[in-house]
């Protein structure tokens, strides 16, 4: 049985201070943690018309577009499931003030393939912030409580963001401290949570796919991953909810609690529909409007993984509709749902559109896992990139490629880069992937039909890495990589040729003036096409179901490209960190932990594009997959 120990589990995941110390004080009922953190003096750096400020202990930077870039120190604690956090306090030493001669640099707006590329001189100040005569941030610290997973155990996360340096723009003064003390009081659950211990993996699929999936169920059980299958029809008959997606989410919650399930594999993509889409297995759209003018909703399988939230200090079901207006994941000018977002179970999807694709994926997974991959090909990692944002000092795609390779010390990097001429056309990618590799990482731009990017400092020229028609040319057979793709809409698995008819019915012939060029009418998206390719391609892909937002430059002036530290670049590169450094060799664990890490470092309800990044980073693959196969 999966019994959470009644002894406190405190995980300090991010150490953030020289001389930091923690003390756990056990009393009759209420427990207390006390921790002191010391900070070094701020370092001020000149950047033309602005300055930047950092401290040695910072774990990240506050990067809200148009607002001053401020160093952040994040402390993370974990507690047993259903722990009640009664109080969190942070007190500080006496502050010192210093007059500065220039304004603190504002954070730029992140970019995607549709908006204007900004250079380091394009930072735009928000007047309401830069004209204020109070300190920014308004509060010197804040905290976020969520429910999620740590090493497959259900825990309560407490993350505390501390701002040792604050800024008064009107007076041109910074205020800073050299010490902080954290005090946390909490109650452990009276009855520690007991989850079932019957299954590791549940596969959810329509009854039409059931027979094709039985060999996968047998294989998983043979590999020691105790597996069962539940049909969509059974779920929608047995469970209640506002729609089929909510019914499926309630089933997943039941499977976690009653069976002890850690992994959920949803099998089913789009099955038709014109004005109203039809699906083999339910999907959920998040209604977070990213402000781009192009996209107010997008697919999010994180909805099915995020089962719990804390409401009035009680752990309850997370329905993604806190304002109860039946619009899920809403974030607009007028309304906003408060969402936990921490994954509570590990979810992946095979977006199969027919039984043939189910058969292909079942065979690929079984063949891959049954035999340990040979290092002669598996230890190769192909990275593909260029200059995603010409005009600044970095070639963003290549920088993310390099950061990912830095985490994969046992792998040989096969670099296909536009800067050195190793990537000039699709054939370069086809040839390298066909040789075999354990991992494949694209970073650049995309739409549902193509991945491409720019050569150095050339915004007008596009070089294509792969397009839909290239997938059948991949001849890597059983040498299947795990792929991460950074690019807009490459994993938008709701596309269909029926969208042309929908566009004409809803927009008339105006559809062909703009919407047609989004390529949402292609038969299948780039990521799924490569995954389900028979005789090659990939085994699984992680990518973005909507617009992929990324950072450029080095605006926090820490000599690390911002593209690797924020938004999608953080997720793209940290997946490889979780595999290569943190030794997470099960695919879904590495993917889910990446989302958890991102949410912890960048509380997603503070900045909408952080929320969107977490929600749209989907896993199209088997979450229980043993990377590299079994011994």
Image (spheres, rainbow, N blue to C red):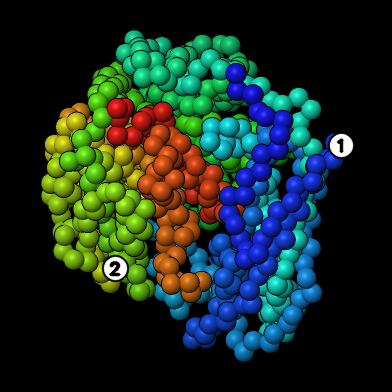
Q: Which of 56 and 395 is in front in this view?
A: 56
Identify the image quadrant of residue 469: top left
Q: Which of 583 and 610 is in front in this view?
A: 583
**Can you give x and y, in whole percent of width and height, for residue 459 in the image?**
29, 68
* Marks 1/2: CA–CA distance: 65 Å
User: Which residue is pictured at 69% across the width and 25% down the height?
Assistant: 193
Is 60 situated above or below 437? Answer: below
**Can you give x and y, in whole percent of width and height, for residue 247 in the image?**
58, 21
Q: Is mark 2 on a helix, strand or loop?
A: loop
Left or right: residue 16 versus residue 261 is right
The quadrant of the rendering that contains the C terminus is top left
**Can you give x and y, in whole percent of width and height, for residue 154 in the image?**
61, 32
The quadrant of the rendering that contains the N terminus is top right
Picture disc at residue 28: 1
Mark 2 lies on residue:
459
Confirm whether residue 619 shows in the render: no
Left or right: residue 282 versus residue 15 is left
Local crowd at mark 2 within 10 Å, few (<14), some, or many (≥20)?
A: some
Is 92 situated above or below 102? Answer: above
Decide which of tag 1 and tag 2 comes sooner along the chain.
Answer: 1
User: Which residue is pictured at 72% across the width and 61% down the height?
Assistant: 36
């Amino acid at each position: 049985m999966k019994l959470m120990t009644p002894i406190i589990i405190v995980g300090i995941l991010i150490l953030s201070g020289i001389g930091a110390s923690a003390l756990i004080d056990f009393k009759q009922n209420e427990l207390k943690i006390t921790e002191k953190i010391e900070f070094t003096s701020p370092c001020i750096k000149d950047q033309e018309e602005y300055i930047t400020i950092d401290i040695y202990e910072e774990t990240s930077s506050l990067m809200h577009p148009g607002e001053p870039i401020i160093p952040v120190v994040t402390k993370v604690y974990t507690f047993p499931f259903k722990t009640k956090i009664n109080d969190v306090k942070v007190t500080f030493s006496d502050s010192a003030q210093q007059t500065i001669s220039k304004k603190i640099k504002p954070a730029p707006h992140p970019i995607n393939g549709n908006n204007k590329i900004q250079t380091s001189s394009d930072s735009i100040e928000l007047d309401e912030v830069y004209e204020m005569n109070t300190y920014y941030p308004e509060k010197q610290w804040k905290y976020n409580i969520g429910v999620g997973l740590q090493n497959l155990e259900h825990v309560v996360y407490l993350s505390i963001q501390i701002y040792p340096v604050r800024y008064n723009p009107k007076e041109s003064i910074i205020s800073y401290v050299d010490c902080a003390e954290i005090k946390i009081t909490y109650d452990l659950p009276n009855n520690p949570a007991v989850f079932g211990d019957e299954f590791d993996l549940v596969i959810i699929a329509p009854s039409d796919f059931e027979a094709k999936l039985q060999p996968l169920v047998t294989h998983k059980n043979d590999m020691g991953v105790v597996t069962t299958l539940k049909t969509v029809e059974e779920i929608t008959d047995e469970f209640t909810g506002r729609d089929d997606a909510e019914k499926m989410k309630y089933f997943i919650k039941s499977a976690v609690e009653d069976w002890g399930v850690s992994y959920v594999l949803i099998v089913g993509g789009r099955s038709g529909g014109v004005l109203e889409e039809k699906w083999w297995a339910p999907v959920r759209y998040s209604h977070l409007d990213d402000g781009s003018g192009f996209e107010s909703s997008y697919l999010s399988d994180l909805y099915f993984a995020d089962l719990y939230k804390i409401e009035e200090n009680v752990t309850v079901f997370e329905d993604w509709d806190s304002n109860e207006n039946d619009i899920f994941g809403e974030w607009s000018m007028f309304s906003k749902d408060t969402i936990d977002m921490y994954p509570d179970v590990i979810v992946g999807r095979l977006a199969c559109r027919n039984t043939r694709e189910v058969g292909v994926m079942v065979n690929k997974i079984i063949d891959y896992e049954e035999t340990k991959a040979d290092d002669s090909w598996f230890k190769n990692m192909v990275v593909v990139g260029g200059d995603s944002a010409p005009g600044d000092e970095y070639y963003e795609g290549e920088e993310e490629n390099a950061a990912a390779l830095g985490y994969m010390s046992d792998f040989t990097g096969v670099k296909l880069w536009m800067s050195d001429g190793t990537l000039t056309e699709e054939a370069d990618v086809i040839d390298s992937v066909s040789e075999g590799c354990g991992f494949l990482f694209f970073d650049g731009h995309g739409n549902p039909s193509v991945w491409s990017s720019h050569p150095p400092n050339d915004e007008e020229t596009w070089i294509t890495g792969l397009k839909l028609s290239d997938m059948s040319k991949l001849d890597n057979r059983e040498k299947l990589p795990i792929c991460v793709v950074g690019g807009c809409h490459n994993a938008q698995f709701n596309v269909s040729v029926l969208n042309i008819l929908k566009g004409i019915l809803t927009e008339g012939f105006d559809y062909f003036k703009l919407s047609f060029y989004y390529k949402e009418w292609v038969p299948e998206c780039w990521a799924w096409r490569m995954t389900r390719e028979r005789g090659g391609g990939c085994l699984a892909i992680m990518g973005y179901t909507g617009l992929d937002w990324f950072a450029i430059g080095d605006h926090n002036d820490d000599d690390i490209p911002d593209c690797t530290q924020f938004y999608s670049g953080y997720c793209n590169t940290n997946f490889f960190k979780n595999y290569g450094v943190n030794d997470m060799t099960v695919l879904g664990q590495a993917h889910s932990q990446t989302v958890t890490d991102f949410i912890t470092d960048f509380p997603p309800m503070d900045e909408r594009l952080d929320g969107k990044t977490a929600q749209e980073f989907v896993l199209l693959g088997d979450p229980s997959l043993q990377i590299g196969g079994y011994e």
